[in-house]
Image (spheres, rainbow, N blue to C red):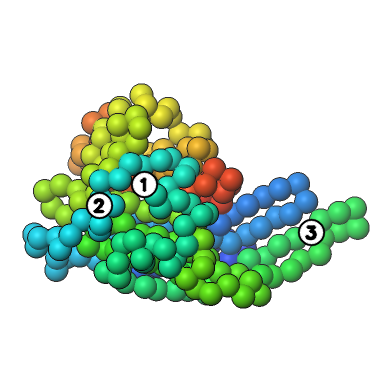
Amino acid sequence: MQDDARKATGTGKGFEKGMVQKKAAGLIAVSAVIIVCGWFFFSRPAALHGVADKIGLPLPDDLNGFLNQPIIVGQGVGNIQLKKTTLGEVESMLGNKFERSEMEGNIGTAHCGDGGCDQTTQNYKDIILNYSAYGIVFGFRAFEGENLAENDLKLRVISITCVRKGGCVFKGQTPEGIHLGSTRKEVVAALGRSDTWTGRQGSISKKKGVNIDFTEIHPTPTGYTHFSDDDPVESFELFSPDDYSQFQRHSI
């Protein structure tokens, strides 16, 4: 990501890298008549370690087979589907080996016309289920006034990352064969280059519903970023294509 510490703009509230271990944030959406400022996205998923005391220990299970399920860009992972699967269903399918966190915020909305703009504010609460031992995070959002039970909230974003020495826990891959550890060259060949300029951090952000981050394996002595075709994938962030304007990466 562009700064390893992404912050909200407008009236929205966000998360910085140090908070990512249990929290997530972010949305920015813009249309001709409605401007939405806020955030609901994960800052550099590789920061979602939270497992220093678990490294080297055997995993208790494979989350009922989830760790080998296919990644479907823009749709989800296996039978856990974005905008369809509920929080209660995720817990039922994968169990309760997660850390739950939440954060409240608001989104400022401006309805603009010939007579000017009328501004309103909508409050929300983000709920995060962080299966940190597996490097998998699920994000949900509840807006004030929706009156939905927490278990009925629909899945909004999935983050998958490597968290253990000696390899990655999640073994699923896309239909094109892209998985954690695939090289930048393989990703570009299979999915194409980024649909937006993401700056020096070298992420690949695709309108079809995925952000991909890489581990830099050839850093320069001066500390400046040096990207290589051999850099491996360190994380995926999956979201609905309809929400691309909310999740797309931007260069700073």
Q: Is residue 84 left or right of residue 136?
A: right
Q: Amino acid at mark 2?
A: Gly
Residue 227 falls in image quadrant: top left
Q: Secondary structure at mark 2?
A: loop
Q: Secondary structure at mark 3?
A: strand
Q: Measuring 51% from the left and 68% from the top, which residue is drawn there?
A: 152
* Residue sitting nearer the eye, 75 or 112: 75
User: Disc 1 or 2, which lies upstream in sequence?
Assistant: 2
Q: Residue at the right extreme?
A: 115
In the displayed structure, 187 sits above or below 26; it is above
Where is residue 85 shown, x and y percent of the image?
Answer: 47, 57
- Dot 2 and dot 3 residues touching (CB under 8 Å): no
In the displayed structure, 188 sits above or below 164; it is above
Q: Is residue 98 left or right of residue 117?
A: left
Give the crowd class for mark 3: few <14, some 14-19, many >=20 residues within 10 Å.
some
- In this rendering, the label closer to the viewer, 2 or 3: 2
User: Disc 3 or 1, which lies upstream in sequence?
Assistant: 1
The residue that disc 2 covers is 65
User: Disc 2 or 3, which lies upstream in sequence?
Assistant: 2
The residue that disc 3 covers is 111
Q: Measuring 81% from the left and 64% from the top, which residue is drawn there?
A: 118
Residue 55 falls in image quadrant: bottom left
Q: Amino acid at mark 3?
A: His
Check residue 78 in the rendering and tell me which mark sits there, or answer none: 1
